[in-house]
């Protein structure tokens, strides 16, 4: 079966047999995950506190150790010294690295945005010269896009590259800020405008080139072990052969690399969330109040269960999207596309899902680490505990790779544009459901089983979102994106729809393949998440309706969307207790 295109999940359903679930990891994939866990245990966890003191040399040395084990080349083809693993495996590696606090940030910056622009868009000479060394850990990479006056609006950057009179160099001048790994990176992927170009180009700059000046490390709220500095480029002579791709390609390169960074961040935070939940469970199993373990308290169980439910749903959605990307990569390669280009074009295609999962993942982790601090009580506020570090380190993820505010707008805009371009038909179903909103609800059928019920709810959620997409597009047309509050409402509905569907399909496949024992526990997770998703969808739908309609139309839309977001009641108390009891018995996150 042909995979759904990006954003097409809103108008089409997916079979459980067509998705990948973590229960299907191969032995090789699990071996890579265990190798990363062993590396963190041996090389990172014992020095986390020292790394947080901002020791540049120690962080660089630790990254290079990871390179010696081959961990920095998981995404790199074999001819450039890498492991050439598929995208699902790359995401599994990102997930496991995610438990490494500041190390995770530095590692991912080098292996991702610091390396892959050269791998994906560079020529053979650039790959041989730089990618081989980045894959081995001999070089550490940095990505230099943001400027003092160019954050979310990256194309407004003022850094300039002027071709020298002899045509052999670009003379680079400008300033970059918030650059991860700046204090010790060997190579910089720098975005600048050539002469008076309106769009960016991308260059490979070496730190040893005369005129490169690294500022002091920023004092940050979290990820303190990660070197974050300003970099100044003062008449730096960059060889013309260090231009990546063609002149003027920089904005496209930056945009597509950000898509990759977003979805990999979504995987990265899974590892951090699982680590935080395990910390919470272990503490709850040790801490006594009123002469009993706090893990016996129902309120603590509620917190642990909710942490686990959201993390399990995120994991389900991440690997569903990752498998879709893998399939598209293979299709592009089979058609003769260059390996690097096939990889980035496949990732860029799923821009909707990348933005969606970046938002959901970063907000899930923020929720998880906050509850872990709360479960620890006063000790959670102490710098002696990992709960403190996890809490502070998490906050950056809602800003990294494009703020969540930008990504919320982006995912709706991109989905609508894809539909208008004809990638799939969104306008037709959206108009149909709007015109027949009073009768478009899918009702219960006789003999409906558990999964049929949940997937029916989700199809109704989709219809609610499509009705709103039609209305906002029709009412505001080109000015639609100015209605950011309404777009955010639709965005939050889409996030709930994709994650609820991914979770339900995963558990359905678990049931069909007997992939796990105690299936009822996983059905509890589906029950609670879909029930909660319905509430979020209902609230956002109502807000959107009253923000852009009035009178009879308002009443009509409100009634229809309320009906579409209605689900049967669930005993969430008992379901959460069962989920929490399972984790408490295991002593860690082990779903």
Image (spheres, rainbow, N blue to C red):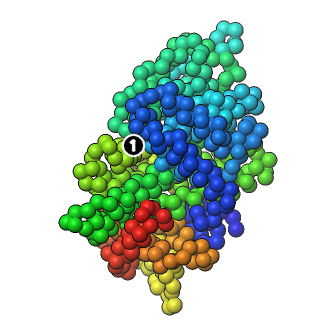
Q: Residue furthest left?
A: 290
Residue 584's spot in the image, x, y percent?
Answer: 39, 67
Vertical placement of 489 versus 191: above or below?
A: below
Q: Identify the residue under disc 1.
A: 393
Write the residue at 60% across / 56% down.
322
Q: Nearer the viewer, residue 520 or 146?
A: 520
Q: Nearer the viewer, residue 166 or 424?
A: 166
Write the residue at 59% across / 36% down.
65
Q: Which residue lies furthest to the top in this view?
A: 165
The answer to whether one can see residue 538 in this image is: no
Classify residue 547 as left or right of residue 248.
left
Place residue 320 in its image quadrant: bottom right
Classify residue 432 as left or right of residue 77.
left
Vertical placement of 408 versus 543: above or below?
A: above
Write the residue at 70% across / 13% down.
168
Residue 367's spot in the image, x, y percent?
Answer: 36, 55
Residue 99's spot in the image, x, y percent?
Answer: 48, 48
Residue 536's spot in the image, x, y percent?
Answer: 36, 65
Q: Residue furthest bottom?
A: 446
Q: Which quarter of the figure is the N terminus placed in?
A: bottom right
The answer to whether one can see residue 219 in this image is: yes
Classify residue 134 as left or right of residue 587.
right
Q: Which of 469 and 151 is in front in this view?
A: 151
Write the residue at 55% across / 27% down.
185
Place residue 129 in its image quadrant: top right
Classify residue 288 as left or right of residue 87.
left
């Amino acid at each position: 079966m042909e995979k759904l295109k990006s954003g097409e999940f809103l108008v089409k359903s997916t079979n459980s047999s067509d998705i990948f679930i973590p229960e299907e990891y191969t032995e090789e994939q699990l071996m890579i995950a265990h190798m990363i866990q062993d590396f963190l245990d041996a090389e990172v966890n014992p020095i986390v506190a020292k790394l947080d003191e901002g020791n540049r040399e120690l962080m660089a040395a630790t990254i290079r150790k990871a390179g010696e084990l081959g961990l920095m080349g998981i995404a790199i083809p074999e001819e450039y010294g890498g492991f050439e693993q598929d995208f699902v495996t790359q995401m599994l590696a990102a997930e496991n690295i995610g438990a490494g606090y500041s190390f995770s940030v530095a590692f991912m910056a080098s292996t991702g945005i610091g390396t892959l622009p050269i791998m994906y868009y560079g020529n053979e000479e650039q790959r041989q010269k730089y990618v081989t060394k980045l894959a081995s850990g001999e070089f550490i990479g940095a990505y230099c896009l943001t400027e003092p006056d160019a954050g979310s609006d990256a194309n407004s950057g003022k850094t300039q590259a002027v071709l020298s009179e002899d045509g052999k160099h670009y003379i680079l001048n400008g300033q970059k800020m918030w650059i991860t790994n700046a204090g010790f990176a060997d190579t910089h992927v720098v975005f600048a405008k050539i002469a008076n170009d309106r769009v960016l180009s991308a260059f490979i700059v070496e730190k040893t080139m005369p005129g490169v000046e690294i500022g002091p490390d920023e004092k940050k709220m979290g990820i303190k072990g990660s070197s974050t500095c300003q970099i100044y480029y003062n008449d730096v002579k960059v060889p013309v052969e260090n231009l990546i791709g063609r002149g003027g390609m920089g904005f496209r390169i930056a945009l597509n690399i950000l898509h990759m960074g977003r979805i990999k961040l979504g995987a990265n935070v899974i590892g951090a969330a699982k680590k935080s939940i395990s910390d919470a469970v272990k503490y709850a199993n040790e801490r006594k109040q009123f002469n009993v373990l706090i893990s016996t308290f129902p309120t603590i169980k509620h917190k642990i269960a909710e942490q686990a439910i959201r993390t399990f749903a995120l994991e389900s959605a991440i690997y569903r999207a990752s498998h879709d990307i893998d399939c598209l990569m293979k299709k592009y390669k089979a058609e003769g596309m260059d390996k690097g280009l096939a990889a980035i074009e496949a990732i860029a295609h799923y821009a909707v899902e990348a933005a969606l999962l970046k938002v959901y993942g970063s907000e899930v982790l923020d929720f998880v680490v906050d509850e872990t601090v709360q479960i620890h009580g006063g000790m959670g506020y102490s710098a002696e505990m990992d709960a403190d570090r996890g809490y502070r380190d998490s906050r950056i993820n809602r800003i990294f790779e494009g703020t969540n505010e930008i990504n919320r707008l982006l995912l709706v805009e991109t989905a609508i544009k894809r539909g208008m371009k004809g990638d799939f038909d969104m306008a037709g179903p959206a108009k149909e459901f709007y015109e027949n909103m009073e009768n478009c609800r899918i009702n219960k059928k006789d003999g409906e089983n558990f999964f049929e019920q949940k997937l029916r709810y989700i199809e109704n959620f989709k219809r609610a979102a499509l009705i709103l997409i039609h209305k906002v597009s029709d009412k505001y047309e080109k000015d639609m994106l100015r209605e950011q509050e309404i777009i955010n409402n639709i965005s939050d509905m889409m996030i709930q729809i994709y994650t609820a569907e991914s979770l339900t399909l995963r558990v359905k496949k678990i049931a069909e393949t007997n992939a796990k024992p105690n299936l009822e526990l996983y059905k509890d997770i589906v029950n609670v998440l879909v029930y909660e998703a319905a509430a979020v969808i209902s609230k956002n739908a109502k807000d959107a309706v009253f923000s852009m309609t009035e009178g009879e139309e308002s009443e009509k839309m409100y009634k229809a969307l309320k009906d579409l977001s209605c689900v049967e009641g669930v005993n969430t108390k008992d379901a959460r207790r069962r989920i929490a009891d399972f984790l408490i018995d295991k002593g860690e996150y082990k779903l």
